[in-house]
Image (spheres, rainbow, N blue to C red):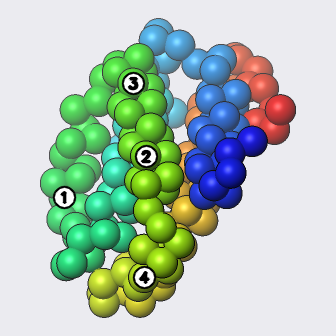
Amino acid sequence: MDANPLVSAVRQVKACFDRSTACLDEKDSTFAPIGGTFTVSQHVAHVAQTIDWFLEGAFRPEGFDMDFAAHQAEIGQATSLAAAREWLDRSTARAIDVFSGKTPEEMAAPIAAGPIMGGAPRSAILSSIADHTAHHRGALTVYARLRGKQPALPYG
């Protein structure tokens, strides 16, 4: 158990995601149930990208980067589940580093004014990261079932 509850929560979010999606493998990377939806690798890459986005947005003086077309273009390049998982590992490690390296006062400081969480304490990004990750974890369990696989329950 980490002394920092934010770090513990990030580790828990990642563990739940990993358990639920462990049945997916590289052969599933480009699977999408219908056109116009994320593939398996794009889902995982999007989760990683969004963790990075929340971390950057919470601490940038100008707030969140709202260039969603650029974000989508980056995710559109994801074709390997292994590479997307590596990105998620890096993003999670970065979140742990950020949360363990900030004082309670820094985490309580407000996010820059704007349409995304403007004025909320920086620590509020954790619940958004957890909720967003759970949403995509759930979608990927549906994808796994469509591939004839049985995802594990997320909670260990």
Q: What residue lies at 67% left-to-right and 57% top-to-bottom?
A: 5
User: Quadrant of the rendered structure where residue 46 is?
Assistant: top left
Q: Are marks 2 and 3 in contact (CB under 8 Å)?
A: no
- Could you tell me which residue is drawn at 62 percent across and 41 percent down? 11
Cα distance in 3D space between marks 2 and 3: 16 Å
Do tag 2 and tag 4 residues touch (Cβ < 8 Å)?
no
Pointer 4 or 3: first along the chain: 3
Q: Amino acid at mark 4?
A: Ala
Relative to 124, is 38 above or below?
A: above
The crowding category of the residue bearing disc 2, from other C-alpha atoms within 10 Å (few below 14, some 14 to 19, many at least 20), is few
Give whichever of 4, 36 is nearer the camera: 4
Secondary structure of the residue carrying numbered label 3: helix
Q: Give the label on residue 99, or none.
A: none
Amino acid, disc 2:
Asp
> Is 116 left, or right, of 145 in this rendering?
left
Q: Residues within 10 Å of mark 1 (few under 14, many from 20)?
A: few
**What's the mark number on residue 69?**
1
> Circle 3 sits on which residue?
86
Q: Residue 118's quadrant in the figure? A: bottom left
Image location of residue 89, percent across then percent down: 45, 31
Position of residue 82 in the picture relative to residue 60 (left or right): right
Quadrant into which the N terminus falls:
top right
State which tag comes first along the sequence, 2 or 3.
3
**Res 24 seen here:** yes
- Give residue 109's mark: 4
Q: Give the Cα separation between the discs numbered 1 and 4.
A: 29 Å
Mark 4 Cα-neighbour bin, 10 Å: few <14, some 14–19, many ≥20:
some
Give me the residue at 19% from left, 46% from top: 73
Q: Quadrant of residue 80?
A: top left
Q: CA distance from mark 2 to mark 4?
A: 18 Å
